[in-house]
Amino acid sequence: MKELLKTYERHHLKLGLCLEIYHSSIMDWCITLGYKTTHPKHGEEIFSIQDCDYELAFAKAQVALKEWLCENNDGY
């Protein structure tokens, strides 16, 4: 989780990103990356990860974020 948040923190302001993390007793861990409300692409989802294992969910989200940054931002 820490690595995901560190990577997100480095880029979210410049790229206008919004990270949502959700969990409840009836829902798996859900991690979604999109664009903040003031960004022209608001409403567009970059990725969404869902898993019952929080460590695996955060690891998958970290990989997804870094892959997206490599494809769309010349690296992380």
Image (cartoon, grey):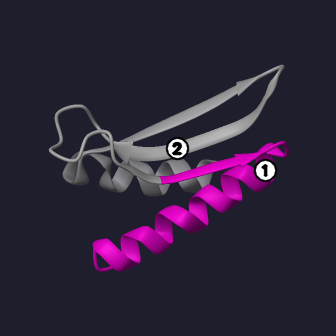
Q: Is 45 inside the magenta-drawn segment?
A: no
Stretch in magenta? 47-76
Foreground residue, 39 or 58?
39
Residue situated furthest top in the rendering: 25
- Quadrant of the drawing holding the C terminus: bottom left
**Residue at which label 1 appears:** 55
Q: Secondary structure at mark 1?
A: helix
Residue 24, given in percent of the width and then of the height, sits at 76, 21
Query: The disc labelled 1 sits on which kind of residue?
Result: Glu
Q: Secondary structure at mark 2?
A: strand
Residue 76 is at least partly visible in this image: no
Residue 71: image x %, image y %?
A: 36, 78
Taking 7 as reference, is 34 above or below it? Answer: above
Q: Which residue is mark 2?
A: 32
Q: For the residues labelled 1 and 2, say whether their Cβ atoms are less than 8 Å apart.
A: no
Q: Could you classify mark 2 by the number of other residues whose Cα lies within 10 Å: few (under 14), some (14-19), or many (20 or more)?
A: some
Q: Quadrant of residue 26 in the image?
A: top right
Residue at position x 70%, y 46% in the image: 50
Residue 48 highlighted magenta (yes or no): yes
**Looking at the image, is mark 1 or mark 2 nearer the viewer?**
2
Could you say which is closer to the camera, residue 39 or residue 44? 44
- Which residue type does callout 2 highlight? Thr
Residue 11 point in image, percent of width and height? 32, 55
Q: Is residue 11 left or right of residue 47?
A: left
Please identify the quarter of the rendering in which residue 13 is found: top left
Tally the numbered discs: 2
Q: Residue at x 35, y 55 (%)?
A: 10
Q: Main secondary structure of the magenta part?
A: helix
Please give left or right for residue 40 compared with residue 21 in the image.
Answer: left
From this viewpoint, is residue 56 visible? yes
